[in-house]
Image (cartoon, rainbow, N blue to C red):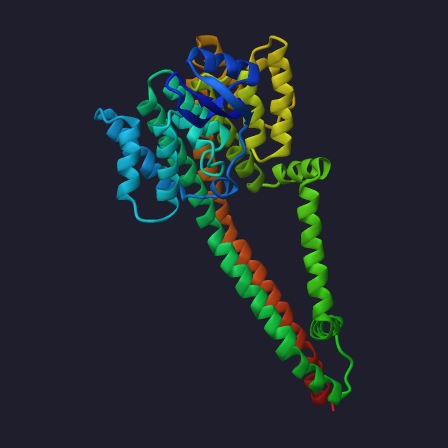
């Protein structure tokens, strides 16, 4: 819902400016009249760019949500709880955020409105959960659900990062070794072979030419590599090319299934949160499709959204050849049939996340031998290109 900055005068003549949620300015004027406030100025709220850019680590945000939940369950008001948490924190992003939120809440703004100023910390789907908790007087439960969701997402991200550490180290080491051999070792052997005036095998010739190209044209190669990387980044922002890229990635062995499960878990998690927040399914599907991070799955979900808008059940509205995992449709059908769509989305989220972890473990088990084999093959090819001319030379000497 849009936010407006309204300057008002109350019955005692006090002037105050605060942010309100309303569909438009007409609805906001009605809200102000109902609150016995006279509007002086109404304008779309302009977010503070400094606050909008503020970031916070997931584990710090999870801890703050748990602490706020505990204090509110103990009977402490939100205003007092925010003030106490801000006072207990050291100087930094978390203290700045809580101080600003407390200032807005003390002036009468709802907590979810104050949170929206921090767009990177509280994106719309998270702010919607807090709004639902406030409107239903179940804010502690909403905060606990939000913290659990963030913890699950953070654990999945850490698992993926840990899975990438070993391949990254091996790739850097292999690149450094090949660069050292081509730039430092191969030229020495090339000088020796040139002084012997022998016919070189094709493998040795290819290696020497690669060494010459690397030593004399490395700036061009670096610019070319940077250009290709930039083209990939730009292409990812083009809808058609991004769709083609994601379509190809989903068909890779192991990696494709991992990406499919990760995207499904993200969609189910955000759709569940927005469903529990009372947001209509159409809006939850639109936001969930955007948050999948995969153009193919996003297109499937947007197509399903059109079917839902036409009156179909979500499980029937998905395209016949959708890219979602096979367990999604039966779970959705069971949830919609029994009126437990939120529980079905929770099941999809948990199962997709567990499948993603299993796929990551499988990928790691396969990745180590593949990388070692590739490294052995490359180093062996370089070593063989050194020894083949020497074998030919020794064979000619023995023949004489």
Of residue 233 and residue 12, the one placed in the foreground of this image is: 12
Q: Is residue 326 visible?
A: no
Asked where in the image residue 293 lies, by quadrant, the reply is: top right
Residue 168 appears left or right of 63:
right
Asked where in the image residue 57 lies, by quadrant, the reply is: top left
Q: Is residue 71 visible?
A: yes
Residue at horizontal 68 percent and vertical 85 percent from the top: 394
Label total for image = 0
Q: Residue furthest left?
A: 74
Q: Residue furthest bottom?
A: 400
Estimate the x, y position of residue 169 in percent, counting from the top left. Answer: 50, 60
- Quadrant occupied by the C terminus: bottom right
Residue 388 appears left or right of 37:
right
Vertical order, 179 against 400 (above or below): above
Of residue 121 and residue 296, the one placed in the foreground of this image is: 121
Q: Residue furthest front?
A: 13
Estimate the x, y position of residue 222 in percent, counting from the top left. Answer: 68, 64
Estimate the x, y position of residue 177 in percent, counting from the top left. Answer: 57, 70
Residue at horizontal 53 percent and vertical 24 percent from the top: 41
Residue 338 appears left or right of 86:
right
Vertical order, 171 against 316 (above or below): below
Vertical order, 363 against 135 (above or below): below
Estimate the x, y position of residue 201 in percent, counting from the top left. Answer: 75, 74
Of residue 83 and residue 6, the one placed in the foreground of this image is: 6
Vertical order, 227 against 24 (above or below): below
């Amino acid at each position: 819902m849009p936010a407006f900055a309204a300057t008002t005068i109350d019955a005692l003549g006090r002037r105050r400016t605060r942010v309100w949620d309303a569909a438009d300015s007409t609805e906001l004027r009605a809200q102000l009249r109902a609150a016995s406030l006279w509007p002086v100025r109404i304008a779309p709220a302009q977010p503070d760019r400094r606050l909008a850019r503020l970031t916070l680590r997931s584990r710090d945000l999870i801890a703050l949500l748990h602490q706020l939940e505990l204090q509110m369950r103990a009977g402490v008001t939100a205003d007092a709880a925010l003030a106490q948490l801000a006072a207990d924190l050291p100087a930094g992003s978390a203290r700045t955020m809580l101080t600003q939120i407390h200032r807005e809440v003390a002036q009468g703004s709802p907590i979810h409105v104050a949170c929206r100023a921090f767009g990177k910390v509280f994106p719309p789907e998270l702010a919607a959960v807090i709004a639902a908790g406030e409107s239903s007087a179940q804010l502690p439960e909403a905060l606990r659900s939000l913290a659990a969701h963030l913890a699950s997402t953070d654990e999945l991200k850490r698992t993926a990062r840990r899975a990438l550490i070993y391949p990254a180290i091996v790739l850097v080491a292999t690149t450094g070794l090949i660069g050292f051999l081509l730039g430092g070792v191969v030229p020495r052997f090339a000088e020796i072979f040139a002084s012997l005036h022998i016919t070189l095998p094709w493998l040795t010739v290819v290696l020497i030419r690669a060494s010459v190209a690397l030593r004399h044209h490395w700036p061009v190669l670096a610019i070319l590599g940077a250009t290709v990387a930039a083209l990939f980044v730009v292409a990812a922002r083009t809808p058609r090319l991004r769709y083609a890229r994601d379509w190809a990635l989903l068909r890779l062995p192991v990696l494709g299934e991992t990406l499919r499960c990760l995207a499904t878990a993200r969609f189910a998690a955000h759709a569940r949160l927005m469903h529990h927040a009372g947001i209509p399914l159409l809006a939850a599907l639109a936001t969930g499709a955007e948050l999948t991070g995969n153009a193919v799955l996003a297109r499937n979900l947007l197509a399903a959204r059109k079917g839902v808008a036409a009156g179909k059940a979500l499980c029937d509205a998905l395209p016949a050849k959708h890219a979602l995992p096979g367990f999604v449709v039966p779970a959705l059908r069971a949830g919609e049939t029994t009126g437990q769509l939120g529980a079905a989305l929770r099941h999809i989220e948990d199962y997709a996340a567990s499948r993603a972890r299993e796929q990551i473990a499988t990928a790691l088990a396969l990745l180590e031998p593949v990388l070692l084999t590739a490294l052995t093959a490359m180093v062996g090819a370089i070593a063989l290109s050194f020894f083949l001319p020497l074998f030919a030379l020794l064979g000619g000497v023995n023949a004489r």
